[in-house]
Structure formats: structure tokens, C-alpha cells
Amino acid sequence: MYGQLILEQAALTGQGDDLVDAIFDVMVRDFSAYAVTLHGHPSTTAAQRAWVLENVREPVGAPDAVWEQVEALSGAYEMAP
């Protein structure tokens, strides 16, 4: 659900693929951590372990491109007093 909202907002605001990839990189890593934990529990069933192995993916990201976007915003915003 969150992924769909992120993609919809990115389309509305014209965000580049690099930023969207970076956001999903975090989400994939978080999911993978949960999946590895599930896989390692002694009470996990064979079906659950198979599901984990079928669904763990390597994240794809472009941290250099995202960092350039963030760096370009340096000094653009000011804290309200």
C-alpha cells in the first residue's frame, strides 16, 4: 500500500526514478530483514521458508544521483525562528 502511494505521489510531483529507487531500496532492505528473521525462527514452517526464499530480492538504487539532489538543496531552506 505504501509503495503505491509513493509511486502515485512521485508521478504527481515529477520526482525522478533515482529518488523513487532510493525510497524502495530502504523498503526492500526492511522487508528482507523481516524475511531473514522469519526464515530463522524454529517455528517457521517449510511453506513459510519457501515463501521467504521466493520473495527476497536485491534492492536497486542510485545513491550518487540522490545525493546530488540533496546536496543541491543545501542552504535552500531556513528554519523558522
Image (spheres, rainbow, N blue to C red):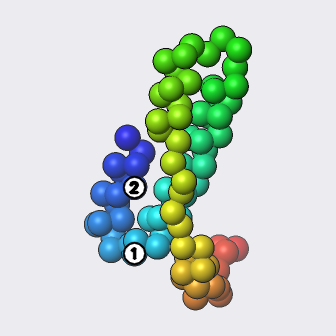
Residue 40: x, y in percent? 70, 25
Dividing the picture into quadrants, the one containing residue 38 is: top right
Per the image, the residue denoted by label 2 is 6
For the N terminus, the quadrant is top left
> At label 2, which amino acid type do we have?
Ile
Residue 73: x, y in percent? 58, 84
Q: Is residue 21 above or below residue 76?
A: above
Q: CA distance from mark 2 to mark 1?
A: 12 Å
Nearer to the camera, 54 or 41? 54
Nearer to the camera, 48 or 8? 48
Tell me which residue sits at (33%, 70%) in the image. 13
Secondary structure of the residue carrying numbered label 2? helix
Q: Is residue 33 above or below residue 14?
A: above
Along the polypeptide, which appears first: circle 2 or circle 1? 2
Q: Is residue 48 visible?
A: yes
For the C terminus, the quadrant is bottom right
Per the image, the residue denoted by label 1 is 16
Circle 1 crowding by C-alpha within 10 Å: few under 14, some 14–19, many from 20? few
Secondary structure of the residue carrying numbered label 1? loop
Circle 2 crowding by C-alpha within 10 Å: few under 14, some 14–19, many from 20? some
Tell me which residue sits at (42%, 45%) in the image. 2
Q: Is residue 25 above or below residue 66?
A: above
Q: Is residue 69 above or below residue 2?
A: below
Residue 6: x, y in percent? 39, 55
Q: Is residue 70 visible?
A: no
Tell me which residue sits at (59%, 33%) in the image. 35
> At label 1, which amino acid type do we have?
Gly
> Is 8 on the left or on the right of 70, as rendered?
left
